Each structure stands twice: as C-alpha cells, then as structure tokens.
Amino acid sequence: MHHEHAWLAERFEEKRGHLRAVAYRMLGSRSEADDAVQDAWLRISGADTSVVENLGGWMTTIVARVCLDMLRSRKSRREEALENDGSAPAAVRDDGDDPEREAVLADAVGLAMLLVLDTLEPPERVAFVLHDMFDVSFADIAPIVGRSEIAARQLASRARRRVQRSGDATDADRIRQREVVSAFLDASRSGNFEALLALLDPDVVLRADRAAILASTARRAQGAPELAEQLVGASAVAHALSGRARGAQLAIIDGAAGAAWAPDGHPRAAFVFRVANGKVTSIEIIVEPKHVAELDVVLE
C-alpha cells in the first residue's frame, strides 16, 4: 500500500506543473491555484486508481472540479456581498504536458485575458479553459460541469465569443491602469489611508503567498503591517498596505500595470493588480522566488 501511495505521489509531482497551469487559468490567482492543486492531491491520494486508464487526464479532471467549486463559492460570496450591501455592482466583470505548449499558453494568458475570464460564469470558464487552452474533449468536460456533451460545447462557444469580443486591453485601458497603480503606490508610500480607500473597489481582494506572509511576520517588529493569505474589503486592504510600498516601483507584469520590488534590478517581489473602472479590484503579492520567476516583469 505504501509503495502504491509513493508511486502515485511521484506521478502527481510529475504533473504538478501542468495541473497548476490549469488551475491558474481557471482561478486567475497563483496562490488559489496552489490551494486547488493541494486540495486535489488530498482527493487523489485517497482514491482508488486501479481502474484509471489515463492518470494525467484523471488528475486534470479532479483539479477542474476543485476549481469549479472554488469559482462557484467565489461567485456566491460576491452575490451575498451585493445583497447585503443593497447596491448594484460597479461593473459587470461582464493532454498537454509538452513544455513548449505550456510556455505558449503562459505567454498567451496575461492579466488582460484573466479579466475577461472573470466575466464568465463558472461552468463557461471551466469549459473554455479546458477545451480551448488544454485540448480536453467535450466528452470529458461534460461530467465535470454536470451538463451534456452538447451543452458543454455550447458553454465553451459562449465563452469564446465573449473573449473574442473583449479582446486584449486597449492602449487607453493600459494607460488608465498605470495611472491607478501609480496613484496607489504614492498613497501607500505616504500612508495616505483616505487616498488608498478612494482607489480601492469596495469588494477588493488582497491575496499574499506564503513567502509574503512570512516576510510580513518577520517585519512586524519594525512596525510593518501584517499580511494575511486573503483580505477582503477596501478598509482591510488599505490598512494592510498603508506604508508598505516604499520600495516598490511601477512595472508591466504579464502585459498589465503592476509593481515590483527589485533592489538590484531583479524582481524579488511582485504586486499584481487588476483594475476595472478606475478602481483596484484585486491585488496579489507574490514573493515565492519560483513564482516571481514565472512572471513577465518589465520594470519602468
């Protein structure tokens, strides 16, 4: 039994990069993608694999189901927040283990694309990502989203049309993104809490990876604000980031405006922003070296 578990763990580690790529494109967050892959492993490690013919495809299916649950939970939380707030949303956020293919996919899916994917319903996003980005058949997608094969095809088709209509961010979008991020960095450096609040969406989400949280804990003695794995809401995020961006500089990260800490010219930490309607809707702080290295960072 121990031998079988060790063998399965080795196969999982071989697939981890691919599974994380699938989860990232579905969730749009590297930290959430890591959580999804870890959750999938807990399910995989306790399953009977004796009847599994395509181990890689089976693992991808489990990760997809975990991501679908996370997307549905995220959507439910947003709807509850809107119901409790009583206001309308500010904007409608209306088998491939080949390394070369993975690199092409990574280049193709920047933050602009992830913003478009955020406008999709969870089943649409799952169907589109699995089929159009990872060549998973609709026969395999159908049971994941709980639809017929024809319905799964329609989900992906609807998603594809929306993605094609939206396209990449325009030059004007990028200029506006840069202005918002620049203003945010200025407010953070100066500790201007009210200015930070004005730049944040009321339901803004801040995510930090484990390395960022450890670094934050180590700096508490110096008066630095403490980070958490996830913070939600403008006030909580403003408190966490007030005074934090003193060493950060503007950067283009995966084709969108962001910030980086690069004391020697090499990025050591990245602040990945998403901006909609002039407000920051999410920030992800990435400090883990291997994850920072995955980003396309151009310092300004």
Image: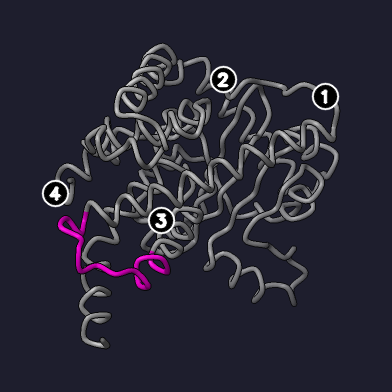
Question: Label 3: few (<14), some or many (≥20) within 10 Å?
Answer: some
In magenta stretch: residue 50: yes
Please state which of the two labelled residues, at mark 3 or mark 2, is closer to the viewer.
2
Q: Which amino acid does label 4 sit on?
A: Asp
Please report whichever mark, 3 or 1, sits nearer to the chain's N-terminal start. 1
Q: Which amino acid does label 1 sit on?
A: Ser
Instruction: Give the residue drawn at x 24%, y 39%.
Output: 134
Whether residue 180 sits left or right of residue 220 in the image: it is left
Q: Do the residues labelled 3 and 2 touch (CB within 8 Å)?
A: no
Q: What element carries label 1?
A: loop
CA distance for labels 4 and 3: 22 Å
Disc number placed over residue 94 in the picture, else none: 2
Position of 19 relative to 300 (above/below): below
Whether residue 198 sits left or right of residue 65 in the image: it is right
CA distance for labels 3 and 2: 29 Å
Q: Which of 292 and 259 is in front in this view?
A: 292
Q: What element carries label 4?
A: loop
CA distance for labels 4 and 2: 33 Å
Locate residue 184, reporting x and y percent.
68, 38
Disc number placed over residue 292 in the picture, else none: 3
Q: Can residue 112 be seen in this view?
A: yes
Q: Can residue 263 be seen in this view?
A: no
Q: Which of 107 and 297 is in front in this view?
A: 107
Instruction: Give the residue drawn at x 59%, y 72%.
Output: 214
The residue identified by callout 4 is 98
Q: Which amino acid does label 3 sit on?
A: Val
Position of 93 relative to 172 (above/below): below
Disc number placed over residue 47 in the picture, else none: none
Locate residue 115, reporting x and y percent.
50, 29
Please report whichever mark, 1 or 2, sits nearer to the chain's N-terminal start. 1
